[in-house]
């Protein structure tokens, strides 16, 4: 069963190793992990997709989330679960192409709403964003139409809950001052209702 | 760099320029540290050089593992944060077993290690090892400090992390150049940000009410008393809960002493080597109230067969423990004492006599394990030693045990009425723990009588710390339970490996002579008749004393739940005395 977590972590050396080490200790495989800056200064945002073992149950997500919170560098964890969320992945795909068959690939790219971002005499590079199945669909079509795929670079999943106001959004809207962190002070860890989840 | 470190510690109140090494000690002084266990070496020499200016006692160990176990024993006995110190590379890696021991048992500890200069970090410099990487899975948190100005904030954070929430060990690795450089030391400014409780900690009134209703309506409730009672000083609250609601109490190994052994509601220890009536009561219960315990596999047997008909209320500070091994019907996630203080007003009282009587009557048939009352047949059993030690010390001594048969016998026959009187490695099961942990306990509580109880196997893992006892002139009494085997492993071989005693017979040195070589007095005891006199000699001796108890070789710990079995499927001690018969006769 796949679990998707959003983790806000402090932007410090070794944080990625701590998070990765936690999953290793729990014997849970990480399917994808993306990290980048978040809306909060000094805080990075991770999207972690993990494959819990077969015997895992509904509580596994809670346990992983609780364990992530035990790491000192972790500020906030959201277990996306089955909540409505937007998930995207970016892929760069390099395909062998000559002047004779380029236009065919251009057509394919257009169908998938992908973009050609580099063109060389014997290859071209396609940029595509979307859900996993869309990216895999393009790669499959490229392979099946005898366009040799030379390289694939995928970012891993990025996920954001739909409509849920994060503290950053509230701040931008001029509301939720109570949640807004004071300058230079660690942002407050939000207390979700854990006991209701079990 | 020379500084005037004032004897009145005024540098703690006035920002002063100090070297990194001085900052280390100044911060420790500010955190009320008075004793440090450690071993110097190249990469931590600047710190040791600065020690003479500070009012901290340094106890030189013989192996860094000893330092981390001593800091651990110190913390368990006193409730304070224990501090261990070691140099880089092999010094730091030798700490790891002690750190893991503290991690598994949630012991507050701060380890300070020297590291090679930041300029050569990552070059495989002499005695360089990535100790923060190595200890990542066995510390609550760790720090690599490369600048003098970061030392005080890191150490102060380390203390806060170690003692807050669910306690645990924290390591601070400090490069040599950070120790040598100087910075303004401002103790107050280095204060860590306020402790933020785990965000999933929340006790909701409606869940409290549900829990209270379950407790009020339970016919066969049992309280499971764990280490968390000691950690959160909740002994009084648990006692109130048990007494007011007339609920019997079973304790975990680390929970021994958290609820008085002599209390009429205390049934005894649960789990693999627990009392059979405790395990039976748990199996028959309709409600378990787990207080600061984590349903360790040694406590529950197989999860699927554990107390099948009961509701479970799990009161625990670490949300990651909820539903890990046993599904909780109601989880009250929070500090045990705070949760109980909220819960108790909802519990007016209850008549539990029929359930208590049922448990009491089940005791009668299960008491066959009690071999201390057998007539003296010339055999000296470990049970005799434990029972007499308990009787003679009136149960008031701090006992540090190793891991194995003697540990379980201690848990069965030494009745702990007082908190923090049992120092034992429960989670990691670390052989070699007893002697250094006992030293740490003695340093923490010099006025208390301290007994180290070790097996002949485990004792040899850290017996070099006898020299530490001698050097520090510590009054530590040592009882070696010597059966010539790695006893618990032999017992498993007997039960599960067809008596193939592969590599468990153990040749030991003459422990009394070994003690003598360290200037420590000792004697050997082979007969039950000499037991009491020997213990009294040890107690009245002015200085450390070692007794080598030559006990029955092939005695086993009963009762026992074989791995993979349910709690009620215990192997009981045979009704006859198996040890005076040939194994073939059984």
Image (tube, coloured by chain):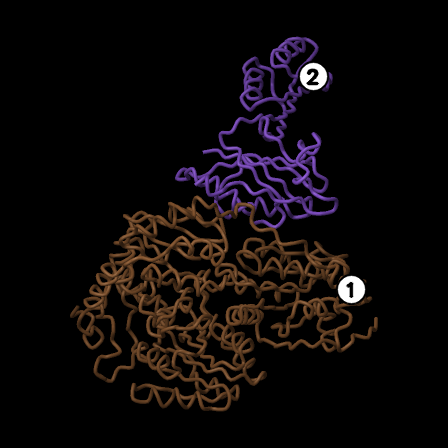
Chain colours: A purple, B brown
Check disc 1 and report its element: helix, strand or loop. Answer: strand
Left or right of B112 on screen, residue A132? left
Q: Could you tell me residue A148's position as x and y percent?
A: 60, 18
Q: Which image quadrant: the C terminus of chain B?
A: bottom left
Q: Check disc 1: other Cα within 10 Å, few if <14, some if 14-19, many if 20+.
A: many
Q: Could you tell me residue B215's position as x and y percent?
A: 34, 52
The quarter of the picture where residue A88 lies is top right
The label on residue A19 is none
**Which chain's residue wears label 2?**
A
Q: Check disc 2: other Cα within 10 Å, few if <14, some if 14-19, many if 20+.
A: some
**Which chain's residue wears label 1?**
B
Which numbered disc, 1 or 2, marks the residue closer to the eye? 1
The label on residue B185 is 1
Residue placed under numbered mark 2 in the picture = A116
Q: Could you tell me residue B23's position as x and y percent?
A: 74, 66
The quarter of the picture where residue B472 lies is bottom right
Establish whether labels 1 and 2 are both on one chain.
no
Left or right of B208 on screen, residue A134? right
């Amino acid at each position: 069963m796949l679990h998707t977590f959003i983790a806000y972590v402090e932007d410090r050396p070794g944080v990625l190793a701590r998070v990765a080490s936690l999953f290793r200790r729990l014997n849970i495989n990480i399917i994808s992990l993306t990290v980048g800056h978040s809306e909060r200064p000094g805080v990075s945002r991770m999207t972690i997709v993990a494959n819990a073992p077969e015997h895992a149950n509904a509580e596994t997500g809670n346990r992983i989330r609780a364990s992530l919170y035990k790491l000192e560098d972790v500020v906030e964890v959201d277990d996306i679960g089955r909540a409505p969320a937007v998930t995207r992945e970016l892929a760069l795909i390099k395909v062998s192409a000559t002047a004779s068959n380029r236009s065919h690939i251009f057509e394919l790219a257009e169908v998938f709403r992908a973009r050609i971002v580099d063109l060389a005499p014997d290859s071209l590079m396609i940029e595509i964003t979307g859900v996993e199945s869309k990216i895999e669909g393009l790669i499959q079509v490229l392979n099946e139409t005898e366009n040799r795929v030379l390289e694939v670079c995928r970012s891993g999943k990025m996920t954001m809950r739909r409509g849920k106001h994060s503290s950053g959004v509230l701040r931008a809207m001029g509301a939720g001052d109570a949640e807004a962190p004071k300058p230079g002070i660690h942002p407050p860890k939000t207390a979700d209702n854990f006991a209701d989840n079990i | 760099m020379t500084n005037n470190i004032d004897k009145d510690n005024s540098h703690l109140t006035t920002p002063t320029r100090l070297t990194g090494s001085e900052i280390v000690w100044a911060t420790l002084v500010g955190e009320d540290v008075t004793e440090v266990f450690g071993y110097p070496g190249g990469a931590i020499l600047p710190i040791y050089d600065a020690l003479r200016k500070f009012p901290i006692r340094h106890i030189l160990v013989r192996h860094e593992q000893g330092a981390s176990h001593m800091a651990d024993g110190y913390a368990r006995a006193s409730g304070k944060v224990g501090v261990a110190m070691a140099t880089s590379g092999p010094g730091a890696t030798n700490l790891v077993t002690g750190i893991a021991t503290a991690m598994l048992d949630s012991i507050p500890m701060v380890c300070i290690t020297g590291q090679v200069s930041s300029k050569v970090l990552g070059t495989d410099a002499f005695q360089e090892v990535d100790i923060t990487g190595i200890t990542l899975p066995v510390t609550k948190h760790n720090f690599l400090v490369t600048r003098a100005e970061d030392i005080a904030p890191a150490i102060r954070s380390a203390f806060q992390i170690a003692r807050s929430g669910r306690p645990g060990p924290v390591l601070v690795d400090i490069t040599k150049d950070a120790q040598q450089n100087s910075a303004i030391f401002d103790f107050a400014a280095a204060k860590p940000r306020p402790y933020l409780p785990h965000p999933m900690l929340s006790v909701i009134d409606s869940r409290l009410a549900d829990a209270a209703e379950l407790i009020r309506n339970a016919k066969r409730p049992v309280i499971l008393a764990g280490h968390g009672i000691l950690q959160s000083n909740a002994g009084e609250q648990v006692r109130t809960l048990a007494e007011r609601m007339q609920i019997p109490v079973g304790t975990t190994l680390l929970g021994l002493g958290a609820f008085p052994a002599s209390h009429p509601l205390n049934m005894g220890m649960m789990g693999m080597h627990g009392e059979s009536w405790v395990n039976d009561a748990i199996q028959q219960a309709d409600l378990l109230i787990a207080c600061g315990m984590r349903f360790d596999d040694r406590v529950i047997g197989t999860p699927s067969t554990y107390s099948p008909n009961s509701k479970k209320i799990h009161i625990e500070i670490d949300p990651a423990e909820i539903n890990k091994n046993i599904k909780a019907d109601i989880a009250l996630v929070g500090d045990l004492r705070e949760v109980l203080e909220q819960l108790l007003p909802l519990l007016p009282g209850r008549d539990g006599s029929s359930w208590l009587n049922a448990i009491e009557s089940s005791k009668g048939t299960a008491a066959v394990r009690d071999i201390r009352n057998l007539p003296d047949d010339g055999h000296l059993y470990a049970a005799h030693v434990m029972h007499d030690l308990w009787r003679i010390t009136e149960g008031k001594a701090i006992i540090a045990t190793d891991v194995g048969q003697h540990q379980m016998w201690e848990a069965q026959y030494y009745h702990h009425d007082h908190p923090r009187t049992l120092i034992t490695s429960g989670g990691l099961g670390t052989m070699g723990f007893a002697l250094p942990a006992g030293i740490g306990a003695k340093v923490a509580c010099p006025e208390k009588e301290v007994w180290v109880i070790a097996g002949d196997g485990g004792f040899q893992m850290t017996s070099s710390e006898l020299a530490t006892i001698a050097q520090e002139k510590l009054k530590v009494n040592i009882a070696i339970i010597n059966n010539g085997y790695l006893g618990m492993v032999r017992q498993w071989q007997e039960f599960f490996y067809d008596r193939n005693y592969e590599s468990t017979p153990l040749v030991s040195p003459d422990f009394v002579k070994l003690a003598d070589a360290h200037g420590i007095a000792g004697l050997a005891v082979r007969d039950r008749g000499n037991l009491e006199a020997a213990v009294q000699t040890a107690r009245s001796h002015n200085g450390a004393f070692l007794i080598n108890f030559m006990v029955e070789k092939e005695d086993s710990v009963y009762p026992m739940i074989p791995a993979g079995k349910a709690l009620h499927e215990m192997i009981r001690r045979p009704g006859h005395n198996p040890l005076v018969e040939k194994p073939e006769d059984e």
